[in-house]
Image: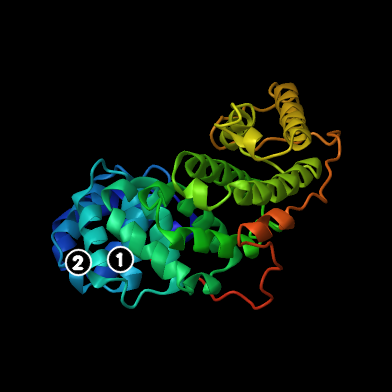
Amino acid sequence: AFAKTDTNSRDYVCVLNEVLPDGLSDIPIRDLCGFLWAAAHISGWALEPFAVASAGEVARRKVSTFGPQDLCMLVQSLAKLDHGRSDSLIMVWDAIFRRQLLGFSPQEKALCLSVLSQRDAREKPALCKMLVRSLAAGDYKLLDREQLCTTVVALAHVWPLMPDDSLPRHLFCELIKTQPWSGAGPTVLTQLILAFAKLSGELAMSQAGKVWDPVTAGAAATEAGTELAACLRRGETLREADAQRLEASLRGAPNEGNASLLSPELVAGLLKLLSADEEAAASDSGDQKLTPCDSPRSSGSDGKSLNGETRHEQFLGSAGCRLGSPSSSPPPPLPMEARG
């Protein structure tokens, strides 16, 4: 309940620290998952004694008996807690691999790939390949729009682990057909643009670039960039850290950043909007102090309108991918819910 409401109760934490460590061996796995979820998602709880003890308790359990939902909840929480090189997290990844994804839903597979890509992908390449191949085989069709976006971002990070495998290429083509950037917010759009840039760079430096023209990633990035420009002109917000990453990428060398993907006009337009953002934030700094990592940025409304009609379907067709209309079928419900 505390995790769902993001309520930080110091009194409750003191009770947990006093009572929980000595009794962890007797609590059910579902309750253990709940304590770890709360510790990972409530600010200030990650390093509390009960959180450290709960993470260590996972390593003392027989994780091979845990169900898929519990395993997914654990990898989310343990990765977010980031207690150094966690033996518990390694054990959970190994249990998922030994299970060969048996019983895992498409949503749980996408979640595992997303978490794995951010932390332990190079240490678990076989599991990465298994997740990508399973999603490419058709499971991606059951993902909702948010999960499609996170899968694109994850795929860009794990691509170097399977440069000669045709299934990542197939999965990426199928993902961009759904146009996951359509209707997405600024944060997601920024993540997608950066993922497309990373993927394009990987393709240019690998043998896969000879098989698949990286213009596919460029066309998708252009659509996402146009969508982002429209969001910023409407006054939607972008976090300071995301804006800095995007600006650095836009100003990068052609073989390092989005300059190789986006048209010069779109790059210039986005930089202008980001510059207007910085000026607006500076003018408001006397009224409210903003932190660089989690503060919203006000968007300028006088940015020059960008042409949103640029389409690259002719290039995508030659690469075996076309930007199609998103599926009209409703997405399945998310399987992961925080359980107190």
Amino acid under disc 2? Val
Measured as percent of width and height from the top left, residue 162 is found at 38, 53
Amino acid under disc 1? Leu
* Residue occupying the point 55% across, 62% down: 148
* Residue occupying the point 63% across, 26% down: 251
**On screen, 206 above or below 78?**
above
* Residue occupying the point 31% across, 44% down: 82
Mark 2 and mark 1 in contact (Cβ < 8 Å)? Answer: yes
Marks 1 and 2, Cα distance to the nearest angstrom? 8 Å
SS label for mark 2: helix
Q: Is residue 10 visible?
A: no
Q: Quadrant of the C terminus?
A: bottom left
Measured as percent of width and height from the top left, residue 321 is found at 62, 61
Measured as percent of width and height from the top left, residue 136 is found at 46, 68
With 273 as the anchor, is 246 left or right in this view?
left
**On screen, 26 above or below 10?**
below
Depth check: give the residue in front, 52 or 230: 230
Q: Is residue 29 visible?
A: yes
* Residue occupying the point 53% across, 62% down: 147
10 Å neighbourhood of mark 2: few (<14), some, or many (≥20)? Answer: some
Mark 1 or mark 2: whose residue is earlier in sequence: 2
10 Å neighbourhood of mark 1: few (<14), some, or many (≥20)? Answer: many
The residue wearing badge 2 is: 63
The residue wearing badge 1 is: 71
Residue 48's image quarter? Answer: top left
Residue 34's image quarter? Answer: bottom left
Most distant residue in the front direction: 210
Measured as percent of width and height from the top left, residue 262 is found at 69, 39
With 37 as the anchor, is 61 left or right in this view?
left
In the picture, the disc for residue 138 is none
SS label for mark 1: helix
**On screen, 191 above or below 128?**
above
